[in-house]
Image (tube, helix red, strand yellow):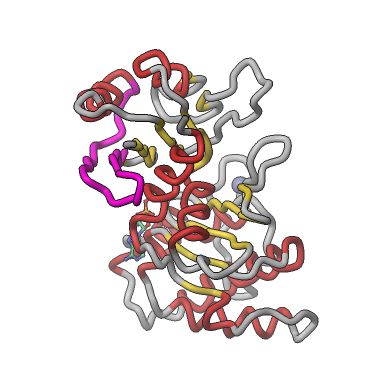
Amino acid sequence: MYYGGIEAGGTKFVCAVSNEQFEIIDRISIPTTIPEETLKYVFDFFDQYNLNAIGIGSFGPIDVMTDSATYGYVTSTPKKGWNNYNFVGTIKERYNIPVAWTTDVNAAAYGEYRMGSAQNAGSCIYLTIGTGIGGGAILNGEVVEGFGHPEMGHISVRKHAEDPFEGVCPYHGDCLEGIAAGPAIEKRLKQKGKDVDKNDPYWDKEAYYIAQALVNYTMILRPEVIILGGGVMKQAQLFPLIRTHFKTLLNEYLTTPDLDTYITSPGLVDNAGITGSLLLAAEKAI
Ligand code: ADP
Ligand code: ZN
């Protein structure tokens, strides 16, 4: 059997084909433009293979409610051409094989749970801190979805006393994503996140915000591992700063696994999302 995986990001699409051992035998990366153009490259790639199922981990928001008329759609995105786009329907029309459909971060969480930093755990959260902030959770081996998928980035956190930044979320202003994702860092410091010195005092504030979010997730879900990915987390100095704030904020109210393993980076490095998509495809394959 062969599986197809699509990691559909707002900036780029990664498509991969794997065998039953989830070894990637071919992959492409293409820029995300308008759906008709992007999907043309996706089809050209997958047309070369006889696939048994495809798994998609998509940027959102997306409709994951199986009984909804717009199941499989990308919903209210400002991204040109993708608003109300029938992604699953378009793929199914072409290939007529089972399609697994979830968010990019749910797929990454599943990849890490099965084959990455949480492979020895019973539960995990994967949080990306990049162009936006989003998270996915795995509990009892299942992707957590209720009335739709979680939106872990749009939560309220306490502002740092020395941070006057008003935030950039068009819906909430200073929600976590509005003050701590890549675009917020860039607007606040007037330079790209990757160019900010690793010793800049701002990183401690960034860590304070992320740590608050992780305390909230811990209180609500008690996962065994929290994995932090995305462009901003390439700033590796954030990890010890986040753990320190986390410890202070939690104030020994709860026990957690050792913080060095509890708050960690993706074991699959940049392949968490695509691996998760392939694993989810395999579960749908017949
Ligand atoms: P996306 O979220 O679009 O899938 P990324 O996870 O790479 O992609 O996130 C991109 C964001 O992360 C941008 O806002 C970028 O400025 C920021 N970023 C990328 N690399 C770094 C870095 N090394 N340090 C800090 N911020 C970074
Ligand atoms: Zn928000």
- Give the quadrant of the N terminus: top left
Q: Residue 26: give x, y in percent of width and height.
A: 21, 43
Q: Residue at x 37, y 62 (%)?
A: 268
Residue 176 makes an appearance in the image: yes
Is residue 14 rendered magenta in the image?
A: yes
Q: Nearer the viewer, residue 31 or 177?
A: 31
Q: Residue 279: give x, y in percent of width and height.
A: 44, 46
Q: Residue 29: give x, y in percent of width and height.
A: 23, 41
Q: Residue 13: give x, y in percent of width and height.
A: 31, 38
Count of marks, rendered view = 0
Q: Nearer the viewer, residue 215 or 223?
A: 223
Q: Which residues are magenta?
A: 13-35
Residue 57 makes an appearance in the image: no
Is residue 91 rendered magenta in the image?
A: no
Q: Residue at x 63, y 40 (%)?
A: 149
Residue located farthest toward the right when viewing the structure as drawn: 253
Task: Classify 47 as above or below 122.
Answer: above
* Main secondary structure type of the part rendered in magenta: strand
The quarter of the picture where residue 282 lies is top left
Q: Residue at x 32, y 37 (%)?
A: 2
The quarter of the picture where residue 195 lies is bottom left
Task: Classify 279 as above or below 35.
Answer: below
Task: Classify 125 as above or below 248.
Answer: above
Q: Residue at x 60, y 31 (%)?
A: 64
Left or right: 209 with respect to 285? right
Left or right: 272 with respect to 160? left
